[in-house]
Amino acid sequence: MNTAGRLAAFRRRLAGEEGEAALVTLPVNMRYLTGFEGVFDEGIAAAVLVTADVARFYTDFRYAEAAKVAAAGTPWAVHIQADSLYVEICRELRAEGISTLTIEDSVPFGRFKFISEQFIGRVVVAEHQIEDLRQVKETAEIEAIQRAAALTDRAFDHILGFIRAGMREVDIAVELEGYMRMNGSEGLAFDSIVASGPNSARPHAGVTDRVINDGEFLKLDFGARVDGYCSDMTRTVMVGEATAEHRRIYDAVLLANEAAIAGARAGMAGSDIDAIARDLLTAKGFGENFGHGLGHGVGLAVHELPSLGRASRGPVRSGSVVTIEPGVYLPGFGGVRIEDLVVVEDGGVRLLSHSPKELIQV
Ligand code: ZN
Ligand code: ZN
């Protein structure tokens, strides 16, 4: 991972926005900037401070050893903090003559308020500073996502041989998740969705103990995490025999998925990529049944920039990794979503998901 390049790019961006010092406190952004692994958790009091000539990582006693190992040979200095992390950082900034401090727009409000009260000077909330940098992936990042996607494909292949009518959704979720964990996934990219019959008509149904019947859709949305990077894929299979109505819905979603994959390329607005799938589903009479955006960026976080939705105006940049996930949901009956992970390039998109997409009856 090119962490020296990331730090340089972040400093250029900070300077471009006339920022003097930036305090980064969200684990995913700290991980991206430093490239450190195994020293972040959601509950940790840690922070990253960047100025034109300071690159400092603050952590506590629990991660002291790991952080020093991770920082060896990098531009990062490690400071081990005692109790009051932000109080001490604000005191140091004052001593160093810093008068303007930039913080992320996604920090919890309580933290923003606390830092604003502690810092003698101006606190500036910067929009998507690191999130923008994270959009365009390095080759090594794409390779990590590719490994996570390959594991997701293998898990799908495995679960096809496991699913039977009469099982509960949770039985399938546990088997799917167990397979990914046993084969190299670091936890899960996100909470899986295993939704059967009428539950599949809810886009984010989760997993219940509902027993799956013959003649129902089964929607599986799941992802692995490899070297910190996520994958995200949805397949909808038919348990038992598909009716003409099942096929009509499935074929429309597949057509929309394939058309968006064929038509998307770097430089297009996210809304224009979304429109390829949406216009097709609207023409098939399913416009009202596709109520979410077509896709989202995937990387260290499973949902990140760029977004591909009706309101996504900005151009999608070459090197972004996004999902293409049209869906049709008919309340009371069922729903279909087909989601692939792709790398956006100048000439088009490259698929990272390779699981079959024809309607599979199990
Ligand atoms: Zn998904
Ligand atoms: Zn997704």
Image (spheres, rainbow, N blue to C red):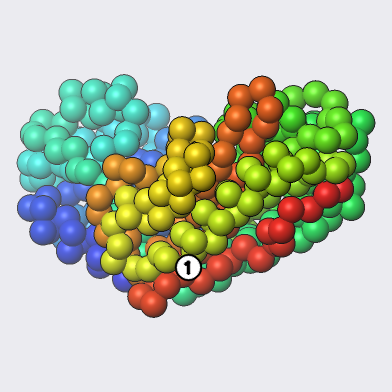
Q: Residues within 10 Å of mark 1 (few under 14, many from 20)?
A: few
Which image quadrant: the N terminus? Answer: bottom left
Residue at image point 89% right, 52% down: 161
Residue matched to label 1: 262
Left or right side of 144 for 260? left
Q: In front: 236, or 333?
A: 333
* Above or below for 304 versus 195: below
> Which amino acid, mark 1?
Ala
Residue at image point 66% right, 22% down: 332
Residue at image point 36% right, 64% down: 136
Left or right side of 183 for 288? left
Visible in this render: residue 137? no
The picture places residue 199, in percent across and down from the top left corner, at: 68, 27
Residue at image point 10% right, 59% down: 16
The picture places residue 183, in percent across and down from the top left corner, at: 78, 58
The picture places residue 179, in percent across and down from the top left corner, at: 80, 51
Visible in this render: residue 309? yes
Left or right side of 235 for 10? left
The picture places residue 349, in percent across and down from the top left corner, at: 46, 69
Q: In front: 128, or 53?
A: 128
Q: In front: 330, or 51?
A: 330
Q: Is mark 1 within 8 Å of ligand 2?
A: no
